Every structure is written in C-alpha cells, then in structure tokens.
Image: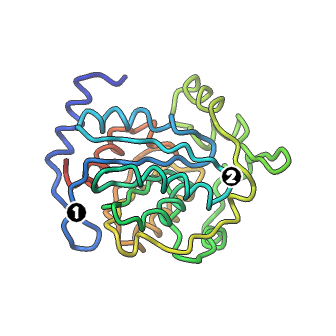
Amino acid sequence: MLTRRSLVLGVSAAATLPLVTARGAEVPRARNVVLVHGLFADGSCWSEVIAYLQAAGLNVTSVQNPLTTLDDAVAATQQVLARQDGPTVLVGHSFSGMIVTQAGIAPNVSALVYVAARAPDANEDYTELARRYPTPPASAGIVFDGEWGSLSEKAFLRDFAQDLPTARARVLFAEQQPFNRALLRGKVTQAAWRTKPSFYAVSTEDRTINPDLERFMAKRMNAVTIEVEASHVSLISQPRQIADLILRAAGGQ
C-alpha cells in the first residue's frame, strides 16, 4: 500500500544517489518527466510511479499512446514534450521504448529511461533482433480481432503481470487498450540513446520481453542499469525502484 511514509522514504533514498550518466557527462537536472506506456495498457499504468515523482516535486505527464502506428505514437509524445518547460526526462515501458528512442532526440529531452523496454538502433528490425533470444511466452497470448490485437486474460495474468495480486491484474487486463497491427511494422530512424544519457530497468522475471535481450540492449546503449526482481510490469509491482531510477535520470532530484 502506498503511504505517506513510503513516499518520503522512496524520495529520500533517491536523493542520496550520485549524479551519474551513461556516457561520462553530468546528468542535467530536470524538473519534468514524460511517461509513455506500451502495449496491453493505457496511461494509468504509471499511477504508482507518478505518486513518487510528484512527491519529489517533479512535473509529470503520462502520454496516452494511440497504439495505431509508430508515427502516430511518436507524434503524440512530441506534442507532450513540446509543452514541457525546461529539461525533461523521457521514460518508456515495453513497446514504447521505440517511441522514446525516436522522440528522445528532442532538444529538451535531458535523459532517457527504459523500463523493460525495446531499444532498437536506427533502422534496426526489432523483430529480427528479438529472434536471437528464446521467444517469451506472452507472445503466444496475443489475439487479433481484424487489425486490432490484445493479450488474452490467461496470458495477461500468467505472462504479463504474474507478480501482481490476481484481482489487481484482472483490473489492469480490463483497462488494456488494443493495438493496431500496423504499429508493429514501424522502425525508428534515429536512436536518441546514442547521444542522450540513458538508464535501463531490466525485469529479471519478464515473460513478455526476454530479460537477456533487455540486458543486451541496456549494455549496447551503455545505460546505467538496474535489475528488478519483477514481471514485465515492474512499474506497477515495484514502483519505488522505477521511480528512484527516474529520479537519478532527473539529476539526483
């Protein structure tokens, strides 16, 4: 349960962390955080993390990803970034790592945070990259209704949010938004992590993206990396750890 005491403890712990970067430069201090959700979710999936960040005095916005095409998703994020006043940490979970990688080139983005997220290079075929690793079980649970896909309840509870109480996971399942098949065909044309300080939270019990693939992507981008003993939805099951990493990316706020 999220209490005032736990908020204060979480913020205090993050405040003592050193100012670090992925590539040796000092992390710019930022007061804004923009969060982007991935597939099988909506913007409310960040609620627990948002509470920690707001308690630290940060201005936080959760993007409502349209889940139609990559271009549409990047455009929605760019609109939110354009409204931020000053340096901004851009955070993506799962599929939205694609969005962070592309939209993160914006001049006001001071750092990137990937939470169990895709992190392709420019023009890289993510599907081909993922095939180098064993296929995670959640993939078999995707069902399509025409061009729109979602995760079955069985797969959602077993392979997406398996470390949450069943009742909580079933609520999240009911809230998931379908994605258009066209979204999966998109490729990033620029890789912001090549020039921006980057941070990565690997989910060690992930059954949606292979944890070893996450480790590979984090190492390739030279990210400041933490490993969280969590399912794919570490932002919900372990929000304090994710918030602490975002605070580090904001310059040790």
207 or 87: nearer the viewer:
87
Question: Which sits earlier in the primary sequence, circle 1 or circle 2?
Answer: 1
Closer to the observer: label 1 or label 2?
2
Residue for point 38% across, 38% down: 49
Q: Secondary structure at mark 1?
A: loop
The residues tagged by marks 1 and 2 sit, at their Cα atoms, a distance apart of 33 Å
* Residue assigned mark 2: 68
The answer to whether residue 20 is left or right of residue 218 is: left
Tell me if mark 1 has few (under 14), some (14-19) or many (20+) residues whose alpha carbon lies within 10 angstroms of its own: many
Tell me if mark 2 has few (under 14), some (14-19) or many (20+) residues whose alpha carbon lies within 10 angstroms of its own: some
50 or 15: nearer the viewer:
50
123 or 240: nearer the viewer:
123
The answer to whether residue 182 is left or right of residue 27 is: right
Residue 153 pos. (x, y %): 70, 34
Residue for point 50% across, 45% down: 63
Residue 233 pos. (x, y %): 50, 42
Up/down of 170 relative to 140, above or below: above
**Mark number, residue 85:** none
Question: Three-letter amino acid code at disc 2?
Answer: Thr
Residue 118 pos. (x, y %): 53, 61
Image color mode: rainbow
Residue for point 38% across, 54% down: 227
**Mark number, residue 27:** 1
Question: Three-letter amino acid code at disc 1?
Answer: Val
166 or 198: nearer the viewer:
198
Up/down of 6 relative to 142, above or below: above
